[in-house]
Image (tube, rainbow, N blue to C red):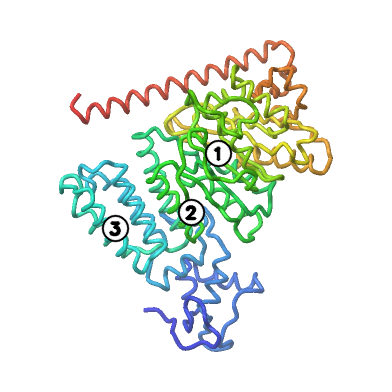
Amino acid sequence: MTDFDTRPAAGADGAFPGVLVSRPDIARLAGVKRPAVTNWERRHANFPTAVNPGADIERFRADDVLAWLSERAVPANARRPGEAAGTTYGDRFRAGLSGGAVGGLLRAVERFAGPEADRLRGSMPLDRYLYWLLYLVMNQIVEPDDGLANAVDTFRESDREHDLPEDVFPRHLLAELADTLGRTPAGSAQESRAAFDHVLVLWRAAYAREGGAFFTPPSVSRVMAGALAAVRPGAVRVHDPYGRTGELLVAYLDAVAAQCGSALPQVRGRVPERLERQVAEWNLRVHHGGSVRLGEGRLTPALAPFADPPGAFDVLLTNPPFGRRLEDVAPPSYWTYGAARRTEFDWLQYVVSLLAPEGRAAVLLPAGASFNAGAAETVRAGLVEAGAVECVIALPAGLFTLTAVKTQIWFLRPPGSTTAADPKVLFVAGEHLGHRLTRTQWTLSDDDVARLVGEYVSWHRARSAGRCFPGTPGLSRAVPVPGIVEHRHSLDPARYVRPPGHGSAAGAPGPDETRDVLARLSHEIASLHARAEAADAEAAGWLGRYGL
């Protein structure tokens, strides 16, 4: 039995008005030992004051304690199983007072999306099952009172609309998922987002295998968003014209919230497919509240010019489709820098046309876009000599789930911007960064993300202040446009940035450099062999399901 009571407390108007708790209550609800509460009182002058000082059992307003504990994150070595990173002692305290359990929603979601997924979905395709699970989780988070009831109605309407038989759409699925999730509230906002993101990652992987969609890896999203949020503080109009599942817009809003804590900007975007548009809107709603309506777009704007107004956006970031050829396309008005025969060069010119006078854009592109010849070189030359290219960051291979393609981030500015008058391009060679996440996939660590963002931001601030930016040996180098013209407008960072002590960019490689190149090639070959084996194993698994 607890000894906290609910006698009215004057002025209490928060989450638990009138609730009073003792020091043992605080320790138990926050998941710490009793002496920890006394230590908090002694070490922190702003610890809540007892409402009855000097009494045999001093009591504190629960709302005051909750507010104080919510500012203190549980250390990684003290988190309980199922508690997400960022969980605070206030999350535990709130969950205990409301009868919930921190980590309960996340654990339930992990079970439904993992060990029990095959039993629950029956013959339903995995991507469709995970889509509905994601929808239920979203409703439980944003409308905990009646969200699941609304979800049930939508679920049944979809069932009737598609006339799905029992063996394709198990009738027991809705009842079991909705009942368990309805009885498992999240203990904190961090846990809610972690539960949603867990299903989102799995759905994107399953959906991508069916449709070949390449969603932006989280670490790459953080590089693109963190850099733009830092160099364009106070940006109001933010846009992603090919939003996929909203991952870049969510990352940008996260970065803005972390850097300044001011009012979030107006975000908008376009998504190519109805299903992805719905998921993107859920993603934004779970992470940043409110309701964001996204429009629908096409594979590339030249096929059907969008209604996005030119020169309208302060920040634009996108991961557009690339590698598709454009045949017999009437040149749209924004093809200022040359005829685009591949989708990536259509998107580059379109993005530049949308930027406000001091706007900035980040576009994720295949590495080949920086050095391919032909029409690609023509467009690239036009962009470079107009001062529209500000920075190119090379990323390591293997960051995507389903492909080992190498990618780069191009940071763009409108040709009329103040820094475009004396154009230079910053090259950041980040191919050597990252670490193995699984046998076939790599990721960038927090330190890697900070290094890449830091190079671009430091260079941008130096340029804005009229200072010289020396670059970082082996990582970055700023090159004037004439130096780029000498190399046929190549924008491949590897051409301009060499590892320290391995010769100049224009000189012949020495023995040490040759040895280093061979070592990197050997590592890349081994990585490609591993990915090929994984692909063979997955293909064999799919064939086995059909008895082949």
Q: Residue at x 43, y 63 (%)?
A: 187
Decide: few, some or many residues near mark 1? Use Cα within 10 Å; few <14, some 14-19, many ≥20. Answer: many
Q: Residue furthest left?
A: 166
Q: Give residue 284's mark.
A: 2
Q: Give residue 220's mark.
A: 1
Q: Is residue 360 left or right of residue 402?
A: right
Q: Looking at the image, tell me whether mark 3 or mark 1 is earlier in sequence order.
A: 3
Please state which amino acid type lies under the numbered disc 3.
Thr
Quarter of the rendering occupied by the C terminus: top left
Q: Looking at the image, tell me whether mark 3 or mark 2 is earlier in sequence order.
A: 3
| Tag 3–tag 1 contact (CB < 8 Å) | no
| Tag 2–tag 1 contact (CB < 8 Å) | no
Seen in the picture, residue 116 relative to 408 is either above or below; the reply is: below
Mark 3, residue position: 154
Front-most of residues 297 and 175? 297
Q: Secondary structure at mark 1?
A: helix
Q: CA distance from mark 2 to mark 1?
A: 18 Å
Q: Residue at x 73, y 18 (%)?
A: 505
Q: CA distance from mark 3 to mark 2?
A: 20 Å
Q: Quadrant of residue 506?
A: top right
Query: Which mark is nearer the camera, 2 or 1?
Result: 2
Q: Residue at x 43, y 84 (%)?
A: 5
Please state which amino acid type lies under the numbered disc 1.
Val
